[in-house]
Image (spheres, rainbow, N blue to C red):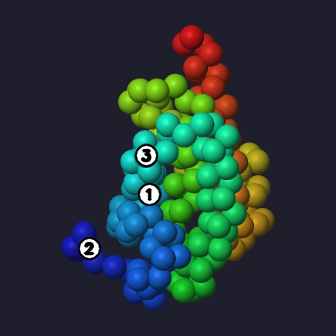
């Protein structure tokens, strides 16, 4: 099986459509293995690009990304014909950004944010799992990752305080 073999349902996406391209994290979500992890990895350079913004602009950018993300994810869901397909990773992009709000500088913190976000996104402890099961469509795709990111953000901030 080739790394670039596309699942049949993903052939319905049009990567020339900016909504679809963003939904699959510029192609990172098309990975046959761990697309959510690949989407989060793709979020790192985007985070590094905007991490120097004043915090209010950084949060505003994430808020816009979340709201627009509902439409982005719904568009891809409609095209694919499946709810919350793993290839849709815009939620990971925004989730990683939320995790990194007010994070200290340094690759160690980027790694910690990556690991914490993936942990909460994969394990989906309560109440994340509750939202994941009950809210569907673009909002549902974005919301469970937002909550996972808020858990990861809290852990990051506690780590920053603890480590001084």
Instruction: Tell me the residue that label 1 is attached to.
Output: 39
Question: How many C-alpha atoms fall within 10 Å of the one at disc 2: few (<14), some, or many (≥20)?
Answer: few
Q: Quadrant of the C terminus?
A: top right
Q: Is residue 5 visible?
A: yes
| Callout in the foreground (3, 1) | 3
Mark seen at residue 49: 3
Q: Quadrant of the N terminus?
A: bottom left
Query: Who comes first in sequence, dot 3 or dot 1?
Result: 1
Spatial CA span between label 3 and label 1: 16 Å
Mark 1: few/some/many CA within 10 Å (<14, 14-19, 20+): many
19 in relation to 104, above or below: below
- The extreme left residue here reads 2
Q: CA distance from mark 3 to mark 2?
A: 28 Å
Q: Name the mark on residue 4.
A: 2
Please tell me whether mark 3 or mark 2 is closer to you in this view: 3
Q: Nearer the viewer, residue 16 or 159?
A: 16
Sequence-first tag of 3 and 2: 2
The residue located at (65%, 74%) in the rendering is 71
Pointer 3 with pointer 1, Cβ within 8 A? no
Seen at 62% across and 51% down, the residue is 62
Q: Is residue 134 above or below residue 59?
A: below
Q: Secondary structure at mark 3?
A: helix
């Amino acid at each position: 099986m080739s790394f670039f073999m596309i699942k049949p349902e993903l052939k319905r996406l049009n990567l020339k459509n900016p909504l679809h391209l963003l939904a699959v994290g510029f192609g990172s979500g098309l990975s046959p293995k761990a697309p959510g992890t690949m989407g989060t990895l793709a979020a790192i350079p985007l985070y590094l690009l905007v991490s120097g913004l004043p915090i209010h602009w950084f949060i505003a950018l994430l808020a816009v990304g979340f709201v627009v993300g509902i439409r982005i994810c719904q568009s891809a869901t409609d095209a694919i014909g499946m709810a919350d397909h793993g290839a849709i990773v815009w939620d990971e992009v925004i989730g990683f950004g939320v995790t990194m709000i007010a994070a200290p500088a340094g690759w160690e913190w980027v790694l910690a944010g990556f690991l914490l976000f993936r942990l909460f996104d994969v394990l989906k402890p309560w109440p994340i799992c509750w939202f994941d099961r009950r809210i569907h469509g673009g909002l549902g795709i974005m919301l469970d990752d937002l909550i996972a990111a808020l858990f990861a953000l809290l852990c990051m901030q506690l780590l920053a305080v603890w480590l001084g």
